[in-house]
Amino acid sequence: MKVGIDKLGFYTPETYVDMTELANARGEEPAKYLVGIGQQKQAIAPVTQDVVTMAANAATQILTPADKQAIKMVLFGTESGVDNSKSTAVYLQTLLNLSADVRAVEIKQACYGATAGVQMACDYIRSHPTASVLVIGADIARYGLNTPGEVTQGAGAVAMLIKANPDLIEIESESVFHSADVMDFWRPLYRSEALVDGHYSNNVYIDFFNQTWQEFQKRTKTTINDFDAFLFHLPYTKMGLKALRTIVADDQHSQDLLTEFEAAKKFNAEVGNIYTGSLYLSLISWLVNSKTITPGKHVGFFSFGSGAQGEFFAGKVGPLKHLESLTNQVTTSLNQRQQVNIKEYESMFMDRKPFDPKDYLFDTSAEKAQFYLKGQQNNQLIYVDTKNK
Ligand code: HMG
């Protein structure tokens, strides 16, 4: 039985900052950010969008009433959770009006959480072929103003419907994991910005990619020539290119893989790092922008979460009936965003949910999304669905 991603939905906040403007403000050459890092725009989340609302705004793009009825699990990958105890998945279940007959949990391992969700979902569907699983990758990447990591921030959510006989991507059952306790990137409980050893984290990423890819080739008796594209977790787009360059040669097939990578990085360069969702935003980018997409194409996936966990797995492009609606949804949401200047971005960055028990209400007059966070009352977050007030 084929199992995998049937539908993909995407949401990113409606405001972004331009990387040339950020470079100028930070006294860096724009080419460093645009070429050396490979980012063009960075999504900025207003205080009224957190991972729960972004996930709901992504999932609502793809779920029909029949899809909702078939969902038996909600697996929410995030490292930007909203509560130390209650899972984002349960908030999402309510906002999406899913049935009570679901298993709803949050999964955390830095940027790897959504891949754990995808693999657990595929295993579940293999033994429950009529069910569906909703997997989310949603995060807000924050390093801090004036830090080396600032250019690699971003925000957004990808929603994936995992089913039997999927339309977009069949996920193959063989995959290779690699895990080790390393301090390349982490966020202690008392911090809202990540701590990172940036250059070390790049090395850990490349090392984990090489280890999992080598082992995958051994176990499956495949080589680079068996793949039409490689997709990567993209904390910034140059990172994936650096990894791909470690395996390509000087031949036509390698040139083709580099061309496919250009398509796969396009949307990530316009959004930034969305942590758990980044690999799947790259999948969307490849499906929408590649000139060669056809059913049956074979694609390798490298998922990475600092701390650290890596996984290499493979998939095949499906019949693609949902590609047109995916293309329309994602291009519309990227094109309708508003640019903010550096002052506005800095003030949005500093405008955080208060970390205290006081009641508060945000100014939500600028919100255009269906789901947003209105405030807090009696220590409880108040989420709004504008279509169901
Ligand atoms: P940096 O030290 O400011 O930058 O930080 P740099 O000096 O290394 O320069 C970056 C690149 O720009 C270099 O290219 C320069 O040569 C080039 P490279 O040698 O790497 O190919 N450059 C220029 N190019 C063109 N024209 C110029 C120019 N000047 C320089 N004028 C760093 C960069 C990525 C370390 C920093 O932004 C950072 O710490 N980011 C956050 C950490 C990160 O993204 N790590 C990635 C791997 S870990 C991961 O993926 C997990 C993660 O997503 C978290 C999770 O799992 O939850 C982060």
Image (spheres, rainbow, N blue to C red):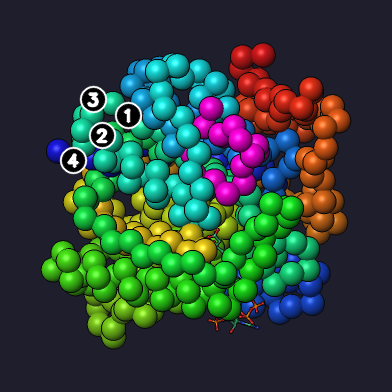
The residue drawn where x is 22% and y is 51% is 172
For mark 2, what is the residue? 125
Q: In terms of depth relative to the viewer, which is nearer, 211 or 371?
A: 211
Q: Amino acid at mark 1?
A: Ser
The mark tally for this picture is: 4
Instruction: Answer yes or no: disc 3 within 8 Å of ligand 1.
Output: no
Q: Position of residue 314 (x, y in %)?
A: 26, 57
Indicate which disc residue 130 carries: 3
For mark 1, what is the residue? 132
Give the quarter of the image for residue 264: bottom left
How much space separates mark 2 and mark 4, taking CA atoms? 10 Å
Query: Relative to 93, is 192 above or below?
Result: below
Q: Dot 2: what SS?
A: helix
The residue drawn where x is 61% and y is 61% is 186
Mark 2 surroundings within 10 Å by alpha-carbon count, few (fewer than 14), some (14 through 19), many (20 or more): many
Q: Which region shows up in magenta?
A: 76-90
For mark 4, what is the residue? 2
First in sequence: mark 1 vs mark 4:
4
Is 88 positioned to the left or the right of 1 in the image?
Answer: right
How much space separates mark 1 and mark 4, taking CA atoms? 13 Å
How much space separates mark 2 and mark 3, taking CA atoms? 7 Å
Find out whether the residues at labels 1 and 4 contact each other: C-beta distance under 8 Å: no
